[in-house]
Image (spheres, rainbow, N blue to C red):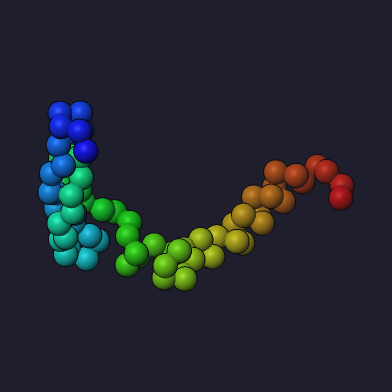
Amino acid sequence: MKKGIHPPYNPIKVTRTDGTTIEIFTTSGKDLVLSQDNLNHSAWTGQRNNTGDKGKRAADFKTKFAGFKF
């Protein structure tokens, strides 16, 4: 790498949702506190958070399009 053209590469602490911290290297230089990670995101856990609102969505649809005949 050429000297003097790259930003500084510093260690930062990343705090996960369960409170554990890990150290990574980045050019940002700011510590991170995550609100989503592999411990609670539905892509990794397989759980869906929006399954309870299907009835409300159907009711909203019927209300919105009550005047139309399908």
Q: Looking at the image, which residue is at 26% across and 53% down?
A: 34
Q: Nearer the viewer, residue 66 or 16?
A: 16
In-front residue for pair 1/14: 1
Location of residue 45 (image quadrant): bottom left
How far from the left and from the top, in percent, is residue 31? 15, 46
- From the viewer's perspective, is residue 13 above or below residue 64? below
**Looking at the image, residue 61 lies above or below residue 50:** above
Residue 8 appears left or right of 43: left
User: In the image, what residue occupies the spot 16% across and 64% down?
Assistant: 20
State the residue at coordinates (16%, 42%): 9
For the residue pair 48 and 54, the one nearer the viewer reads as: 48
The x and y percentages for residue 8 are 14, 37
Left/right of residue 66 with respect to residue 27 in the rendered view: right
Residue 64 place in picture, x, y as percent: 70, 43
Q: Which residue extends farthest bottom?
A: 46
Q: Is residue 11 visible?
A: yes
Which residue in the rendered view is the most extreme toward the front? 2
Task: Using the rendered view, name the quadrant where residue 10 is placed.
Answer: top left
Residue occupying the point 12% across, 49% down: 11
Q: Is residue 2 above or below residue 21?
A: above
Horizontal and vertical percent position of residue 68 = 83, 43
Given residues 51 and 59, the one toward you in this image is 51
The N terminus lies in which quarter of the figure? top left
Q: How many marks?
A: 0
Note whether residue 30 is visible.
Answer: no
Residue lying at the far top of the rendered structure? 5
Image-based side of 48 in relation to 8, left or right: right
Left or right: 36, with 57 as reference point: left
